[in-house]
Amino acid sequence: MILNDAVGTAHQPDPHARIVSLVPSITELLCELGLAAQLVGRTGFCIHPAALVAPIPKVGGTKDVNIDKIRRLAPTHLVVNIDENERPTVAALAEFVPHIVVTHPLAPRDNLDLARLLGALFCADARAHAWCAQFEAEYALLAATAKGPPQTMLYCIWQDPWMSVSPDTYIARMMAEIGWSVPPLSDPARYPRFAWSDALVGQIDGVLLSSEPYRFTEVHADALERQIGKPVHLIDGEMMSWYGSRAVAGLRYLRQIAEGKLLR
């Protein structure tokens, strides 16, 4: 069986893989698929599920990776993501890790292909199939939920400098599931910087302050709401941006937002 990753690289199933994951959400998914025992390395941000990842050696962050430590762990497979990991780092690791598995889910339903790829690659097909069934059930419930009117919401991931998300990101496509869109910004980056202005505020119906990577709080939300005169909500960044296992809970989270049960 030939399995192609996000950049078209072909892989063969390997039931004995020694895996290093540099993607927190995918570390969680690999554990969900019953593969925790084959994870020989993870980042310090790979914190879920806590009990299963605790004994797995840390190899740095998603970008500041300890290459020598990974070399000593002798993995057969490295799982990375186009948005989260640096290309030069991955290239350096590819010099001694035989198989680099590249991921890049861009929309909620891309999680199905992601789970199927990892399940087939690491011989956990049955668990992957069961997980996909859970996802489809939750997706159907969200699709059947009444949505409010479309809104333009500025999703903030950082301040100093202020940063948001572009329409082609996973976060923006999660937002689209309940009728939210992101405003156009002058910075063409996938995670654009922006400055507050009357023109920008005039384009939006509200602001979403994410809990990660910058940990916005009620203090930030209250201050910004007074500044711009538009509703400002705190939102769970893991639910909106973690694909893999968290996507099922993320769809449920969106459904609760649509039902008016969440957000400040």
Image (tube, rainbow, N blue to C red):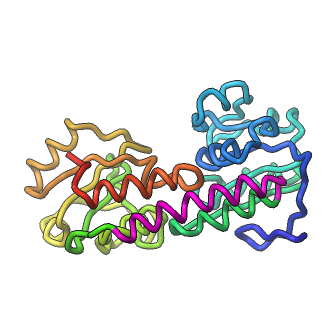
Quarter of the figure with the C terminus: top left
Residue 135 shown in magenta: yes
Q: Position of residue 251 (x, y in %)?
A: 43, 58
> Is 118 in front, or is 47?
118
Residue 187 in view in this figure: no
Query: Picture quarter containing residue 99?
Result: bottom right
Q: Position of residue 81 (x, y in %)?
A: 65, 57
Q: Main secondary structure of the magenta part?
A: helix
Q: Position of residue 100 (x, y in %)?
A: 81, 57
Query: Picture quarter containing residue 123?
Result: bottom right
Q: Position of residue 105 (x, y in %)?
A: 59, 65
Q: At 69% from the left edge and 42% from the top edge, which residue is drawn?
A: 31
Residue 18 shown in magenta: no
Q: At 41% from the left edge and 72% from the top edge, which residue is drawn?
A: 167
Residue 39 in the image: above or below residue 230? above
Side of 260 where 83 appears, left or right: right
Side of 220 where 136 appears, left or right: right
- The boundaries of the magenta stretch are 121-144
Q: How many numbered marks, from 0 up?
A: 0
Quarter of the figure with the N terminus: bottom right
> Is 232 in front, or is 91?
232
> Is 241 in front, or is 68?
241
Q: At 58% from the left edge and 36% from the top edge, which residue is drawn?
A: 48
Side of 148 where 198 appears, left or right: left
